[in-house]
Structures are given as C-alpha cells and as structure tokens.
Amino acid sequence: MAEGVTTVEIKSGYGLDLANERKILRVARRLGEQFPVTIYTTFLGAHALPPEYQGRADDYIALVCDTMLPALHAEGLIDAVDVFCENIGFSVAQSERVYDSAARLNLPVKMHAEQLSNIGGTQLATRYRAMSVDHLEYLNEADIVAMKEAGTVAVLLPGAFYFLREKQLPPLDLLRRYQIPIAIATDSNPGTSPTTSLLLMLNMSCTLFRMTVAEALQGVTTHAARALGKSDRHGLLAPGRRADFAIWAIESLAELAYRCGDNPCSSIVRAGIQESRT
C-alpha cells in the first residue's frame, strides 16, 4: 500500500484443508474491510499435494472439487479459482476437474502453468477462457495463439524467476508479436517470491525480462486489472471510473523501474479520497 497499490489479489493455497483455506480467504476479506485497499480473492486449493495425500492426488482433487470449493463459494469467499498445473503440481486431467467444478458455480478461472515445463496447462486454461495464466517461462507459440483467441492475460512473475534462479525466460518476443496483454505481479509467497514490492517487480521486469518501461507500467495497471477480470473498474483513469492513483515525486516514469529500494510515492488517492501513507 505504501508503494501506491490500491488493489490486490490474494490467493489461498497454503492451508490445503477446508479449515485453513477458509481462514486464509476470511483474512483476505477482512483486510479489504479494515484497510484502504480493494481485495480480490482467488481459491488455489489445488496448489500442492498435502503430505497425507501422497500417492492419492485424485482423492485430494476430489476434496477440492466436492468439499472445499462448494463450501467456500457458498460463504462468499471466492472471486476466482486457480490451479497449479505442472509436473510437480497437478495433471491436466486433474486441473480440468477443478475447472469443471468452478464452471458449475459460475466462477472464473486462472492457472499457474508452464513454469518448469510444458504439459499443456495453458491449452486447458484457454479452453475454459481463463482470465490469466501465471509464470509462463515454457510457453510456446501454439499456447500464445490459444491465449490470443481466448483473451487470456499473461502474468509474468519476475520475483519468482529471480528467487529460484531460473534460466528459461518467458517468450517476450512471441507475446509481443501476438499482442498478448502482459501483467506483472509480485507473486508474494514464502516459498518462491518473498517480496511485496511492486516497484521492485517493475525493475526486475525490465532488467530480467527485458521489458520496456511502458510495458512494465501497463503490466501493473491496465493489464493487471484485466488479469483480474476487473478492467471495467481498475487499471486506468477515465470518466466514470474509480479515482485510484498514486502521485510520484519523480522527473520521469522511467524512474519507477530504475531505482532499487527507493519509494518516491508522495501521495495516494483511492476512490477520490487522499489516503495517509502511514
């Protein structure tokens, strides 16, 4: 919030049982009530396999689909549904079961895909018109064509790329060629991207991913809003929209992606009201 962020997506996926997934999502909702920030929640119960389900991934997916998802949706805790489709996560078939359950509840979907390999996650996500797909280091051209047709946003996560010392860069040239909207996020999490600084992500998207300043800035505003399915409310200033914006003490917008460890945010306006930065 101190860096000018007024809208945040919070994902679950660190409880891996109904009680703790519920707790995470309830906390997310409460943060949006107690602080001047808009919170959108994403249920990521299919994030990892709990130790007690080792060798029984299908049984855990059944728990996610038949118990967790309906219960948490009924409590009004879910805005979207995500799944980690990867060799160390869940298979395409298991991910599709999660998507089918989300579709029955009329919930939009997202996906973690193509981070460590390409097993077809993005192709599945686009068949279900996923709002966004995250990571995407191993994305190929056929995936990008499918994203273009589905209107799916590419969410790049330079913090995880850096922290895991990855070598495979996301295919920026192909994403540009097909004019895929590219969002940038912190992927703030205790395992692979322990940062909450969106300003640092601007820097890393330019230095590590070779994005332009304009691309990076669009990535944390217009395209980020689109990745949430909220481009009608957030992401740009226009008549009739919420007046959410930050005022920066800088000479050029490039400074936002240039400095490391500096926060030149001088003022934040949320819904037309100036907020305290303390």
Image (cartoon, rainbow, N blue to C red):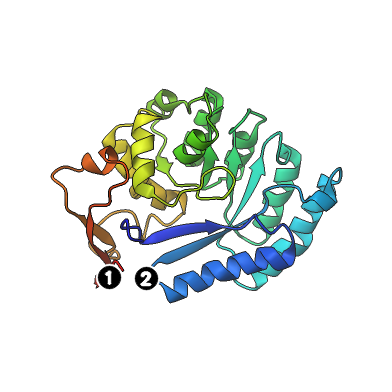
Q: Which mark is residue 226?
A: none
Give neighbour class at mark 2: few <14, some 14-19, many 20+ (Cα, 10 Å): some
Give the amino acid at mark 1. Glu
- Measured as percent of width and height from the top left, residue 86 is found at 67, 36
Residue drawn at 66 percent across, 72 percent down: 74
Give the amino acid at mark 2. Pro
Tag 2 and tag 1, C-beta contact below 8 Å:
yes
Q: Which mark is residue 36?
A: 2
Q: Which residue is mark 1?
A: 275
Quadrant location of the N terminus? bottom left
- Measured as percent of width and height from the top left, residue 154 is found at 47, 39
Does residue 236 lie above or below 201 as drawn?
below
Name of the residue lying farthest toward the bottom: 34
Mark 2 or mark 1: name the one nearer the start of the chain: 2
- Measured as percent of width and height from the top left, residue 176 is found at 38, 28
Does residue 172 lie above or below 34 as drawn?
above
Residue drawn at 29 percent across, 69 percent down: 271
Residue drawn at 86 percent across, 46 percent down: 56
Nearer to us in this view, 255 or 96: 255
Give how far apart the Cα atoms at labels 2 and 1 are: 8 Å
| Residue 143 located left or right of residue 19 | left
Residue drawn at 50 percent across, 29 percent down: 145
| Residue 194 in view here | yes
